[in-house]
Image (cartoon, rainbow, N blue to C red):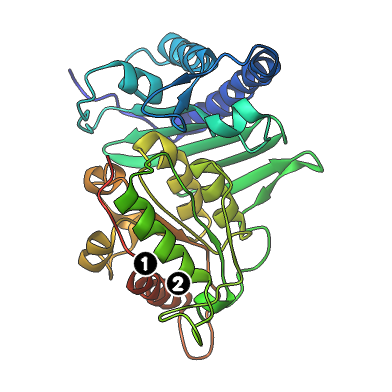
Amino acid sequence: MATTELSPHDFLTLLQFTKDLARSAGELIRHGSTEILQAGDVDEKKNSVDLVTEWDVRVEELVKSEISKQWPSFNFIGEETYAAGTGDRPALTDQPTFCVDPIDGTTNFVHGFPFVCISLGLLYKKQPVLGVIYNPFLDQLYYGLKGQGAFVVLPSSPQPIPLPLAAPRPLESLSQALLGVEWGSDRRSAVMTRKSASFVRLAGDGKEIKGGKMAHSLRSMGSAALNYGSVAQGGLDIYWEIGCFPWDVCAGIVIALEAGCYVTGSRDFFLAHRDEDPSAFTDWDELIWSRKYIVIRAIADTEHEKGRDAQRRIVEDFYNTVEEWDAI
């Protein structure tokens, strides 16, 4: 099958389509929230903290149906479709491919905690090129298109606001940073030991805790996509997580890159690609499926250091502070 070629006009049409689709899906998510809080209809995927509801499936079915009507030649990778299948990793191709998490933040969703979103990413020729993230409870819409910038639409400002929300600030070290981290659904003893030790070093006072960085604080929002949006807007300085999947991060990666963020994968991936510009990657297959992700906000140049060099330096310091593990 020949690759579907997309023109600049096609991308603008796709962006509007995806934003409209996100809002339509958001209405279903809000309706589902009311229903689930009344009925408590929740299933477990892997364990008692890895949750799925009928609404995850219904939202994904809505999204997949609308995409197939408008763009029938496009491929589709969705969280619930993947979970219901063989679990085999689909290879990225040159064909346009929507990468979708219908409800990112399902645990928040079932508890009525309003940090929930739909994440709609588009891969084209193996690269993330378009991303839309919509939180229907807070009515926040993040979006980005490769080469065209990233924006957010807020209830207080219906006109799109460029990201980051303010001019990038310097960031000298982790001790000045607000960090996004997550507990995740993998609660094995070895994982929890490494994760907890990492959190202690990131937050702890180096005078008493070996390797302590005494970051301003750690935040757990419960949604990978919204973490990416928060870093892109400059609210979080860094977000790091092990265990996510492409549908959790694809849209966020586009938005973050367009907002001047530095995006990379595991420690080994970072060191192997340290001097490369992430926006110039040509084959994202290794990173998008790495299950290990870190993103740092845009940083201003100073008299002594370029912002991009500061991003790399701080990511390296971060990886010298934390421990990694294999995601399952």
Q: Residue at x 65, y 45 (%)?
A: 152
Secondary structure of residue under mark 2: helix
Looking at marks 2 and 1 on the same chain, the residue that comes earlier in the sequence is marked by 2
Q: Residue at x 56, y 51 (%)?
A: 220
Left/right placement of residue 54 relative to residue 33 reads left
Residue closer to the observer: 211 or 33 = 211
Q: Where does the C terminus fall, quadrant-wise?
A: top left
What's the mark number on residue 201? 2
Question: Disc 2 vs disc 1: Cβ atoms closer than 8 Å?
Answer: yes
Residue at the outermost front position: 189
Name which quarter of the figure residue 186 lies in.
Answer: top left
Q: Is residue 97 above or below residue 37?
A: below
Q: Is residue 237 above or below residue 309?
A: above
Secondary structure of residue under mark 1: loop
What's the mark number on residue 129? none
Residue closer to the observer: 21 or 220 = 220
Q: Determine the CA span between mark 2 and mark 1.
A: 7 Å
User: How many other residues sit within 10 Å of disc 1, few (<14), some (14-19) or many (≥20)?
Assistant: some
The amino acid pointed to by label 2 is: Arg
Q: Which residue is mark 1?
A: 322
Q: Residue at x 32, y 35 (%)?
A: 124
Where does the image place residue 12, in percent across and percent down from the top left? 51, 33
The amino acid pointed to by label 1 is: Val
Q: Is residue 5 above or below residue 161?
A: above
Q: Residue at x 50, y 84 (%)?
A: 208
Left/right placement of residue 54 relative to residue 94 reads right
Where does the image place residue 81, in percent across and percent down from the top left? 35, 18
Left/right placement of residue 159 relative to residue 312 reads right
Q: Decide if residue 233 is in sight here.
A: yes
Where does the image place residue 266, in percent across and percent down from the top left? 29, 58
